[in-house]
Image (cartoon, rainbow, N blue to C red):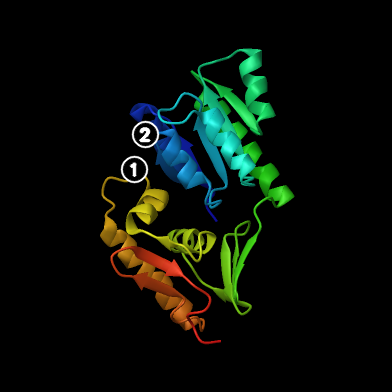
């Protein structure tokens, strides 16, 4: 399965370059341009790693990281900053960062650090399984099962289900799904969300979980274990 990486930087050029480069390396990338958006995306726990700039509008990378760790989100975080002082790096690591990359950076070096972080996370199984009734979403293997039966999902279908499962029973809006899964993809629209939610529903129904994903009219989608018959 493709590693899913959240790239957070307020410079459009950096976001686009990292998005393009990481996708070329086979990763699924979502981008954010400010601290509050980064925190909202990352706290879902649906990413394999986060590349987090420190100097961000709205909320600094330090504060985003601090809040994530306070909430128990263990997703690996690589801090990215133009600050190269020892104290800056020590502060970031003390807050729970898994690495520190100094700007301007070599993409090759950043990629190597990112891959190392992803390997360590996979080896330690930091991302557990979400269980909602008979549904199991294994975030380490990026697979889903209903009543022990594997639900065959494409990477993007899995990402839709994982976001819904991670935030159940809360309602997730189309815009939130669009931002968290498609990021800065210019061609993506709410119609993409509707199409992929439809795909997920059909595959869940085929596995016996018909009705698990409900449309909340005027708001979005909700995954609720009490909805489908057992």
Q: In percent of the image, x 56 and y 68: which residue is there?
A: 144
Residue carrying label 2: 16
Q: In percent of the image, x 43 and y 44: which residue is there?
A: 30
Q: Residues within 10 Å of mark 1 (few under 14, many from 20)?
A: some
- Residue 98 image point, x, y percent: 65, 34
Residue carrying label 1: 184
Q: Which of the two labelled residues, at mark 2 and mark 1, occupies the earlier sequence position?
A: 2
Q: Quadrant of residue 10?
A: top left
Under tag 1, what secondary structure?
Answer: loop
CB under 8 Å between discs 2 and 1: yes
Q: In percent of the image, x 61 and y 12: which residue is there?
A: 85
Q: Nearer the viewer, residue 174 or 148?
A: 174
Q: Is residue 118 above or below residue 164?
A: above
Under tag 2, what secondary structure?
Answer: helix
Q: In the displayed image of the protein, which residue is found farthest to the right?
A: 124
Q: In percent of the image, x 60 and y 34: which residue is there?
A: 66
Separation of marks 2 and 1 at Cα, in angstroms? 8 Å
């Amino acid at each position: 399965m493709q590693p899913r990486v959240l790239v957070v930087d307020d410079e459009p050029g950096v976001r686009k370059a990292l998005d393009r480069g990481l996708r070329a390396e086979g990763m699924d990338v979502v981008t954010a341009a400010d601290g509050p958006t980064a925190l909202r995306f990352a706290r879902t726990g649906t990413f394999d790693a986060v590349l987090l700039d420190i100097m961000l509008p709205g909320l600094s990378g330090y504060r985003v990281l601090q809040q994530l760790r306070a909430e128990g989100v263990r997703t690996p975080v690589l801090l990215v900053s133009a600050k190269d002082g020892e104290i800056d790096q020590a502060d970031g690591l003390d807050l729970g960062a898994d690495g520190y990359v100094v700007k301007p950076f070599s993409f090759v070096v950043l990629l190597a650090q990112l891959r190392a972080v992803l390997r360590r996370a996979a080896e330690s199984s930091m991302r557990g399984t979400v269980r909602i009734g008979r549904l199991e979403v294994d975030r380490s293997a990026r697979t889903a099962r209903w009543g022990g039966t594997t639900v065959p999902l494409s990477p993007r279908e899995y990402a839709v289900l994982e976001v819904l499962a991670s935030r159940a029973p809360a309602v997730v809006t189309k815009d939130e799904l669009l931002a968290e899964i498609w990021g800065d993809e210019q061609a993506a629209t709410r119609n993409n969300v509707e199409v992929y939610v439809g795909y997920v529903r059909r595959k869940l129904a085929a596995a016996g979980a018909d009705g698990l994903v409900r449309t909340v009219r005027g708001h979005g989608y909700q995954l609720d274990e009490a909805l489908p018959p057992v």
